[in-house]
Image (cartoon, grey):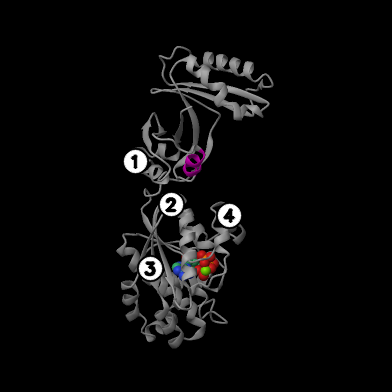
Amino acid sequence: MKEIVLIKLGEIALKGLNRYAFEDALKKNIKSALYGCGYFKVSIAQSTIYVTPQSPVDMDEVCDRISRVFGIVSFTRACVCEKNMDDIFAKAPEYLEDALKYAKTFKVEAKRSDKKFELKSPEICREVGGLLLEKYPHLTVDVHNPDVKVVVEVRDFGAYIHAGNLKGAGGIPVGTGGNAAILISGGIDSPVAAYMMAKRGVKLTAIHFASPPYTSERAEDKVQRLLKKVCRYAGPITMLTVPFTKIQEKIKDECEEELFTIIMRRMMMKISSLIAEKYECAALITGESLGQVASQTIHAIACTDEASDMPVFRPLIGMDKEEIIQISRKIDTFDISIEPFEDCCTVFTPKHPRTRPVLRFVKYAEEDAHLYDLIEEAIENVKITELR
Ligand code: ATP
Ligand code: MG
């Protein structure tokens, strides 16, 4: 039986004049998400996107991938019928078998956007309901709270039968919210921050600071694996790895120990904003959460913020670790995040990092250390990896 995926447009249907840009982005993102799954026609009509396979495909895999595309509130996997009752009758019982076999109650709903169709909606419901009761005599009809809602849709180009909606990923299509750079570590928080901003339509570029030989190739590989999980929601991501060793060593040699972390974080922000600009990103994203560690107090964040002149989004700022972990489990990054590899943040950590750094003094220390000469060199030696 020929199957199709019907995607109902949610929040994006409300976007007035932007609507076409949103629909185009969504269509493009759906095609990209289905890359390697087979061939599809992705078209739009009557506020619905039709994903029609043009070759044999694994529909479970197709639906799984579509469930992670932002901008979709709900979607359905449906059986394609010719626009006549004979064909609907021929296909409905078999197609709905899995859904109805273990159900106790059901109801039929009909949507008839083709007003020329031979029967009216209540008649379609009655006829299809009667047929299903005949084939599955254990069922009873419950119009208020059925176990299964069978839907028959008669549209312009065909009739479709399905057993209700599947939940989409919500959010808005990636690419319609501009470009931003996520500062990604191997930890739990930053992949979650990346996911959350992608959900709001932001196209991501990733920046990772590595300090070999203090950090290993396996630590970098871990970050790539995390980003690939994020790609399942955010689409392809360019990862930029910044060599950070010289800068960190210089901070260690030249600066007061209590300021190591805050100066290092300021350097990350400064370098990231320069790289971000080069890659046409208009904002930075971090996985910081207020009060989580010494470098994430209000005073410390005020100091790091000042190092870049771009807006910095911190989607996790008000969240507890438990809430962040819940999302990281949902997006399947948690198990990778807890693998024990070193991050450049854990190299040269001071015993007592300052929790109330004063910007003026931090800047003096930074200037005295002549760190700025090393920034250009780090940016010139950025390594580019394309992930999908
Ligand atoms: P995470 O779990 O994301 O590592 P964290 O709680 O360990 O966060 P920090 O190590 O203080 O916190 O890092 C705060 C933020 O700084 C991270 O969420 C991330 O956005 C950024 N960051 C930390 N280390 C790196 C790195 N090596 N490369 C790029 N960004 C980093
Ligand atoms: Mg970290």
Q: Which residue in the protein does label 2 denote?
A: 234
Q: Amino acid at mark 1?
A: Asp
Q: Amino acid at mark 4?
A: Arg
Q: Please, what secondary structure does the residue beneath circle 2 have?
A: helix
Q: Answer yes or no: do the residues labelled 4 and 3 have beta carbons within 8 Å?
A: no
The span picked out in magenta is 60-67
Q: Give the left or right position of residue 209, taking residue 189 as reference.
A: left
Which label was assigned to residue 53? none
Q: Please, what secondary structure does the residue beneath circle 4 have?
A: helix
Say which label, 3 or 1, has the lower sequence index: 1
Q: Which residue in the protein does label 3 denote?
A: 272
Label 4 – label 2 distance at C-alpha: 17 Å
Q: Amino acid at mark 3?
A: Ser
Rendering coords of residue 57 (x, y %):
45, 37
Say which label, 4 or 3, has the lower sequence index: 3
Q: Which residue in the protein does label 4 denote?
A: 329
Q: Which residue in the protein does label 1 denote?
A: 24
Classify mark 3 as within 8 Å of ligand 1 or not, answering yes or no: yes
